[in-house]
């Protein structure tokens, strides 16, 4: 059994993986790297993994636990990067009679420096596609170009974080009710406002204030501000990203995720005449880590 430890800043995912890449079981907790204030990552892993540690033939750690300020820092594998790049940059640590392998993230240098840790192992699960345009939705969404199974390039969009900041304390947030029901219609209206050109003028920065002014003029209900605002930011992200990561109208995107956020990206891309297929990220990561482990044994 292979133990995949996906250790992000705010969450810890533990996945028991068979040698064939099948997910045998998973455990999730809120013990992200930010919660490990004393630096004793080994104790946290032992507590959360329990008997899985002793039962594991191999243990691989990905995510922020391998970054600066984490458990064991690994260098980034520079793009174009494949699974071989992760193997070359891996670092082993002996802990309580077990060898734990820390895998690197992936970096790009041009046109701006960018990095990822944790998303790459999921992306490599799509290696059979050869070439693909991939979106990993999240607080910091990743748009990735996969070519012949290698990460050729990617970009990070912090739309989710910008939304959280605006929704918490801004001139836009002051009209927001404390709670409101989700509204797909308001979200898609924001997407349309972000993608619309012509007489509307400007880009997403020009249009963000409309989340307030539309309410003041009676054109938007306060309950819809949150989803309209999120639609504006998501739409602005897509407008920007399509200039870099696109194969034209009707092209397919792979979205790594099956939850509500991923479904919203799928809905939004339809308005841009793009198709999107949802993929289960844990299954992809498990398939990739099993393939990596087999190659590492050769």
Image (spheres, rainbow, N blue to C red):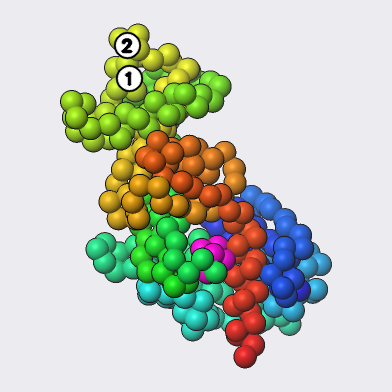
Location of residue 103 in the rendering, given as x and y in whole percent from the top left corner: 53, 74
Q: Is residue 193 left or right of residue 206?
A: right
Q: Distance of mark 2 from mark 1, alpha carbons? A: 6 Å
The residue lying toward the viewer, choosing from 173 and 111, is: 111
The residue lying toward the viewer, choosing from 62 and 110, is: 110
Q: In the rendered structure, find residue 212 and report the number of the disc placed on it.
A: 1
Q: Which residue corresponds to the image point at 55% horizontal and 69% vertical from the top-left?
A: 128
Q: Which residues are magenta?
A: 122-127
Quarter of the rendering occupied by the N terminus: bottom right
Quarter of the rendering occupied by the C terminus: bottom right
Q: In the rendered structure, find residue 283 and report the number of the disc placed on it.
A: none
- Other residues around mark 1 within 10 Å, as few (<14) / some (14–19) / many (≥20): many
Assign the magenta stretch its main secondary structure.
helix
Where does label 2 land, which residue? 216
Q: Which residue corresponds to the image point at 59% horizontal and 43% vertical from the top-left?
A: 259
169, above or below 221, in the image:
below
Q: Which residue corresponds to the image point at 44% horizontal and 24% vertical from the top-left?
A: 186
Q: Is residue 224 left or right of residue 237?
A: right
Identify the residue at the far top of this view: 218
Is there CB contact under 8 Å for labels 2 and 1?
yes
Is residue 270 visible in this depiction of the protein? yes
Is residue 172 a member of the stretch shown in magenta?
A: no
């Amino acid at each position: 059994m292979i133990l995949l430890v996906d250790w992000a800043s705010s969450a810890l995912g533990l996945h028991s993986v068979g040698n064939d890449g099948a997910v045998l079981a998973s455990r999730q907790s809120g013990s992200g790297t930010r919660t490990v204030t004393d630096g004793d990552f080994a104790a946290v892993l032992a507590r959360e993994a329990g008997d899985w540690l002793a039962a594991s033939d191999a243990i691989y750690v990905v995510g922020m636990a391998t970054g600066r300020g984490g458990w064991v820092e690994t260098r980034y594998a520079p793009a174009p990067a494949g699974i071989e790049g992760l193997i070359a940059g891996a670092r082993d640590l002996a802990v309580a009679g077990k060898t734990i392998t820390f895998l690197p993230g992936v970096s790009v240098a041009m046109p701006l420096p960018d990095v990822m840790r944790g998303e790459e192992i999921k992306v490599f699960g799509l290696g059979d596609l050869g070439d693909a345009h991939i979106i990993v939705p999240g607080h910091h969404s990743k748009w990735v170009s996969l070519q012949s199974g290698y990460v050729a390039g990617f970009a990070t969009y912090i739309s989710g974080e910008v939304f959280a900041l605006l929704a918490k304390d801004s001139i836009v947030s002051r009209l927001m009710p404390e709670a409101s029901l989700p509204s797909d219609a308001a979200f898609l209206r924001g997407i349309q406002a972000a993608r619309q050109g012509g007489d509307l003028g400007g880009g997403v920065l020009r249009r963000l204030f409309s989340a307030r002014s539309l309410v003041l003029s009676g054109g938007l209900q306060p309950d819809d501000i949150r989803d309209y605002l999120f639609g504006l930011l998501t739409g602005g992200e897509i407008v920007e990203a399509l200039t870099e990561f696109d194969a034209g109208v009707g092209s397919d995107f792979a979205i790594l995720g099956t939850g509500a956020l991923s479904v919203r990206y799928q809905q939004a891309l339809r308005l841009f005449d793009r198709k999107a297929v949802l993929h289960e990220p844990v299954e992809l990561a498990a398939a990739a880590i099993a393939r990596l482990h087999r190659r590492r044994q050769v």
